[in-house]
Image: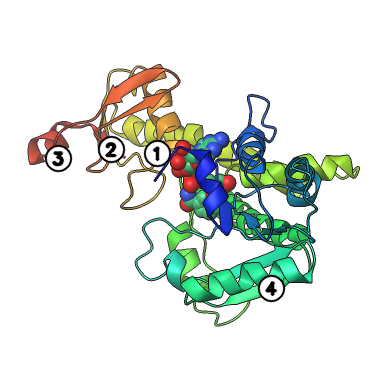
Amino acid sequence: ATGDFSFIKEVDAVAICVPTPLDAHQQPDISYVKSSTESVSEYVHSGMLVILESTTYPGTTEELLKPILEKSGLACGKDFYLAFSPERVDPGNKQYKTKNTPKVVGGIGKDATEVAASLYRNVLNGGVYEVSSPAVAEMEKLLENTYRNINIGLANEMAIICNRMGINVWEVIEAAKTKPYGFQAFYPGPGLGGHCIPLDPFYLAWKAREYDYHTRLIETSGEINTAMPEYVVNRVMKVLNKKQTALNGAKVLVLGVAYKNDIDDYRESPALNVIDHFIKEGAVTTYFDPYIPEYKHKGVIHKGEKELTDEMLRDADIVV
Ligand SMILES: NC(=O)c1ccc[n+]([C@@H]2O[C@H](COP(=O)([O-])OP(=O)(O)OC[C@H]3O[C@@H](n4cnc5c(N)ncnc54)[C@H](O)[C@@H]3O)[C@@H](O)[C@H]2O)c1
C-alpha cells in the first residue's frame, strides 16, 4: 500500500472505493469521492482506466468524476476510459467473496465498458455483466441495497404486528419459506447496520428529489427500522415487568454489538442505540462481543466484558 498518489503515473487502471457516508442532514457526503478523484486527476495519463466502485447516486461517474478527470486536459472515451462497477461484499459470508461474486460494469462508451470488463474477467471468477452506462450500474447497486433495506423494514413491521396479535413471527417466516418461488426470507431485528444498507437508499432518495420524486417506500422503511432499537428496549421492559423488575436499576447484559454475525464492524450498528436507550432508562448495562472489546459512539467510549462467564449470565436480570 502507498499513500503517494504519484504512483498512479505508473499504473494502467485505478479503482476508487472510498467511503460514501451521509452528512449530519442525512444527505450524501460525496467529499471522499471528489477529493480522491481530484488526486487521481493530477496523474491521469493516456490509455488509463479509472473505475469508481463506491456506492453512490446515479449520475456520479458522468456528472462528477468525468469533468474532474477532464481538467487534466485529456478527453474521456478518447484519451482515458471511465467506468462504474459497484463493490459487492458480504462481510462474514463464507461462500461468496469478491473473487467468486459476479461483477456489474457500465462504462462511458462501449470501449470503456469492454476495457473495465476485461480487467475484472482476468482477476475474478464470478463472471462480469456489462450494462449500457455507469448510471445503470450505479442504480442497480442502489436497487440491491434498497431491496434489502425495505424487506428488512417489512420483516420488522411483521414482528411488531405479530407481537400484538400473539403470533410467533419466526414461525410465520419459517412457514412462508416453504414456498419455492416468489418469497425470500428476511428477518426482524433491532434495525439496520453497516456502512451500506442503512445509508445507500438515502443516496437514491436525495437524487430522486432532483426529479420531483419523493421515495415514500424508502422513507417509511427508514422510519420503521430507525424506531426498532427503542422498540426492543420497550419489549425488554415488558418482559422484566412480568417478573416485577423495573428496567431502571436492572442488570442488562447485551451479547454482540457488531451489525451482523462474526464480524468486527460496528458502523451504524443498531446495538449501539439499544445500549444507549438502556443506559438512558437507568439499566446497569454491560456487553460482551468477542470481536469488539470496546467501541466509540457519540463521543463516548464503551468497554466490553473480557469474557462471557456463567456467573455473568446468572447475575443478569435479562440477556439481550
Ligand atoms: N464494506 C462493505 O461491506 C461494502 C460493500 C459494498 C459496497 N461498499 C461501498 O464501498 C465504499 C467503501 O466502503 P468501505 O466499507 O470499504 O469503506 P472503508 O472506510 O472501510 O474504506 C475506505 C478506504 O478509503 C480510504 N480513503 C478515504 N479517503 C480517501 C482519499 N481521499 N483518497 C484515497 N483513499 C481514501 C480510507 O483510508 C479507507 O482505507 C462505500 O461506498 C461503500 O458503500 C462497501
Gap between marks 2 and 3 measured at Cα: 13 Å
Residue annotated with mark 2: 292
Graded by Cα atoms within 10 Å as few (under 14), some (14 to 19) or many (20 or more), the crowding at tag 1 reads many
Real-space CA distance between mark 1 and mark 4, rounded to the nearest whole angstrom: 37 Å
Q: Where, quadrant-wise, is the C terminus in this rendering? A: top left
Please report whichever mark, 1 or 4, sits nearer to the chain's N-terminal start: 4
Q: Three-letter amino acid code at disc 3?
A: Leu
Q: Which residue is mark 4?
A: 114
Beta carbon at label 3 within 8 Å of ligand 1: no
Could you say which is closer to the camera, residue 13 or residue 254?
13
Q: Which of the marked residues, 3 or 4, is nearer the chain's N terminus?
A: 4
At a point 9% along the width and 41% down the height, the residue shown is 310
Dot label at residue 308? 3
Q: Are marks 2 and 3 in contact (CB under 8 Å)?
A: no
Q: Position of residue 193 (x, y in %)?
A: 48, 43
- Counting from the top left corner in percent of width and height, residue 33 is at 63, 40
Q: Which residue is mark 1?
A: 266
Q: As displayed, is residue 303 above or below residue 238?
A: above
Label 4 crowding class (10 Å Cα cut-off): few <14, some 14-19, many 20+?
Answer: some
| Mark 3 to mark 1 CA distance (whole Å) | 19 Å
Q: Report the Cα–Cα distance between label 4 and label 2.
A: 42 Å
Q: Earlier in the sequence, mark 3 or mark 1?
A: 1
Element type at marker 3? loop
State if disc 2 and disc 1 touch (CB < 8 Å): yes
Q: In this view, which residue lies farthest toward the right? A: 212
Mark 3 → mark 4, Cα distance in angstroms: 53 Å
